[in-house]
Image (spheres, helix red, strand yellow):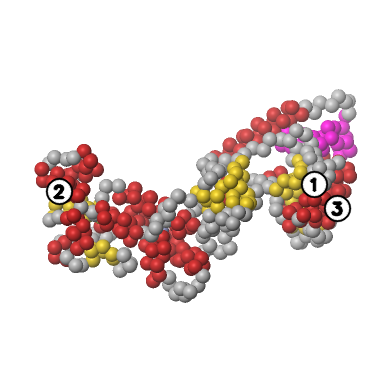
Amino acid sequence: MMEISWEEITIDAEADQELQKVRDALISGRWDQGLRRFESEARHLRLLGPLIFKDNKVVLPGSLRRKALRSAHQGHMGAISMKRILREYFWWPGMTREADEFVKKCETCLLLSRKNPPIPLSTRTLPNGPWEILQIDFFTDKQFGYGEFLVVVDTYSRYLYVIEMRTMDADATNLALSRIFEVWGYPLAIQSDNGPPFQSEKFIKTWEDKGIKIWKSIPLSAQSNGAVERQNRGIKEALAASRIDKVNWKSALDKYVHMHNKVRPLSRLGVTPFELLVGWKFRGTFPYLWDNHENNLDRTEIREKDALSKLESKLYADEKRGAKPSDIVVGDTVILSRAKRCKSDSTFGADKYTVVARDGAKIVVCSDRGVQFSRNVQDAKRVPETFNESATELLSANEHLNEQGQSSTQNNEENRLNRGLNSDDKRDLHSTMDDEPRRSTRELKKPSKFKDMLLYTIFG
Ligand SMILES: [Zn+2]
């Protein structure tokens, strides 16, 4: 436990050159240029022996300020709690700013911190034409058939395929795609998430050998494989509706796909996916007077409409999400958010990575061991260049806080996180306390009388 006694303060205050100047100035009324921060508070400053008080808070000599900060941060108090603790006892110029900076530089607190706000969405421009870029994904609903569906969407036209799959391996996926490609030919690129069949050597090699680029979307990012992910809800609803309507789910799904592809014009573009794909209207669903034979699908106009509506929805979404651009750049050291398996997991993993590339929302990071992978920039948080040397000190100081009595022989990492959890809980507790009116009216005792007494003990 870290404590600061009156004795320490008295001794250090006597020897402190800055405070000596302040004492002189208080007596003479003449202030040095360098003492502005004291001068502006002069009306509130009082002398008591070698000690200076601002109202009833002692002005802490420079030598003890860091100790006070460390002490007030025990239990990883958040900046607000920490400032409240300090203000209760001490004053020095810049105290609150130093408290803020102290918390920012605490590694444990960084790991437990919240994620940065999301970055603004990037608007994907429409590919040059149909069947250039396909997005593929698996949709799972165990209540229907084999429960797995391969979903394929052409990102230009939104033309959709939903294929029931007996297995999700590379062979089955390749076969299903081959059947589609027999009709429409090969796309230029296939984009998928990192699901098992899509990252398999067999899958990648099969299609790359045919000149198709295989693109991976960014893992853990909701926006990355958007065209196909947007379809999942419609598919889900169609399947659910078949239950209610008591009809065969397969024909319900076929009907949904048919309506999506060939009948319902896309709200933003006013034409159907089928028309965008092949250039003419689908004939057969409803009677239609085919006197208008010149094909007037204007692909330039389609592109302009698409860009405009995407921009509008991006701006709307950014505003709703409170998005902020990320300033992470190549060369930064970052930590990465991780999937929380339980509430007690910290937001970020402790491993540090170096950013080696950034392209919009995507960053490529490199671990100590040289392993590279890509993530969404939103999942990264920059690590300050130096952490407080006190981080470990604080942890050992907190040992007694660990109510579960963790064995100290446990692996370090786990211990750290467990402690993090405890202090996090405590912090939550503190922030709820923040809302209550403060009733503490602690009287400052006369220093001389309590020469050897502790000024305060946190958790005492
Ligand atoms: Zn901390």
Amino acid type, callout 1: Glu
Q: Measuring from the top left, give residue 29's x and y in whole percent.
A: 12, 41
Nearest to N terminus: mark 1 or mark 2: 2
Quarter holding residue 399: bottom left
Q: Which secondary structure lies at badge 2?
A: helix
- Would you name the residue on which mark 3 appears? 175
Residue appearing at x 79%, y 58% in the figure: 168
Amino acid type, callout 3: Leu
Nearest to N terminus: mark 1 or mark 3: 3
- Would you name the residue on which mark 2 appears? 23
Amino acid type, callout 2: Arg
Q: Is residue 143 left or right of residue 93?
A: right
Residue appearing at x 83%, y 32% in the figure: 279
Residue appearing at x 84%, y 35% in the figure: 278
User: Magenta stretch: residue 229 in it?
Assistant: no
Please state the extent of the stretch shown in magenta in the rendering: 265-289
Q: Residue furthest front?
A: 369
User: Magenta stretch: residue 271 in it?
Assistant: yes
